Image (tube, rainbow, N blue to C red):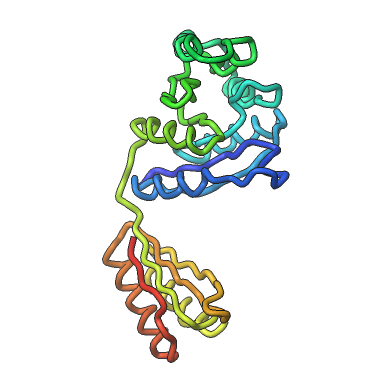
Amino acid sequence: MNKTASLLIIGNEILSGKTQDKNLNYIAKKLANMGIVFSEARVVPDIEKEIIFAVNELRKKFDYVFTTGGIGPTHDDITTECISKAFGLKMICHPEAKKKLEEYYKDRPGTLNEARLRMADTPEGATLIENPLTSAPGYKIENVFVLAGIPSIMQVMFDYASQFLEGGVKISSRSVSCNLIEGDIAAPLTDIQNKYPNTEIGSYPFIHQGKYAVTLVVRTTDISAMNNAADEIVDMIKAKNGIIIEDISE
């Protein structure tokens, strides 16, 4: 059975709308390619009790939990403190992380002051997740992976962390877009979904050339079932005199 994963996005800036999250899409695609089922994403504010509650709930529910945000040098970067409390562990200045920061700032403007040194904090016993861009690492503790919020840094951290993940059968998808609208295909689409219970069929409306259209996406680890279901969707669209706009497999 494929492993499951969730994402906890931490930060008031996401909830305020001032910052647009760009990490979820990257993580979702990477997990799908690894055959890990991405099952849930949450956004929580920089409030200690909210972060602790979410971390403890998600780490019991899923095989892997990824967090993004809140591991920088400022006062509102409280993720590590919260992770430590969620696990009941002491928060320490990780010696290896400190060494990496000392090396990074040795030949650069600025100094490794008290604020920057906070980026070396981890729960006791954590395994570091490398960050070749700025040296300030992320870390993992049991099944929780704590990553940066800045997309470019999060991506290199995630790629490094992938060595700790147990992949499964790749989750493939086939997307069929047509010029019909959801209300016209809802009943036959339900019949197709019931016929292929080991697939996930989603319906996503959009505007095409000024008119309503819809993309029907079949997702599963069973490529044969995916194509059989998608072929029936294509036949259903044609039977309703619809036009296929696009048919893409990933």
- The residue drawn where x is 70% and y is 28% is 48
Q: In this view, does 203 lie to the left or right of 73?
A: left
- The residue drawn where x is 66% and y is 24% is 78
Q: In this view, does 55 lie to the left or right of 34?
A: right
Q: In which quarter of the image is residue 131?
A: top left
**Residue 235 visible at all:** yes
Image height of 215 relative to 234, above or below: above
- The residue drawn where x is 55% and y is 15% is 109
Q: Position of residue 241 (x, y in %)?
A: 43, 91
Q: Which of 121 and 207 is in front in this view?
A: 207
- The residue drawn where x is 56% and y is 11% is 92
Q: Quadrant of residue 56?
A: top right
Image height of 219 relative to 32, above or below: below
Q: Position of residue 199 (x, y in %)?
A: 39, 64
Q: In which quarter of the image is residue 192?
A: bottom left
The C terminus, quarter of image = bottom left
Which residue appears farthest toward the left when viewing the image?
A: 224
**Residue 141 visible at all:** no
Q: Where is residue 75 in the image (x, y as percent from the top left)?
A: 70, 22
Image height of 137 relative to 10, above or below: above
Give the total number of marks visible in the rendering: 0
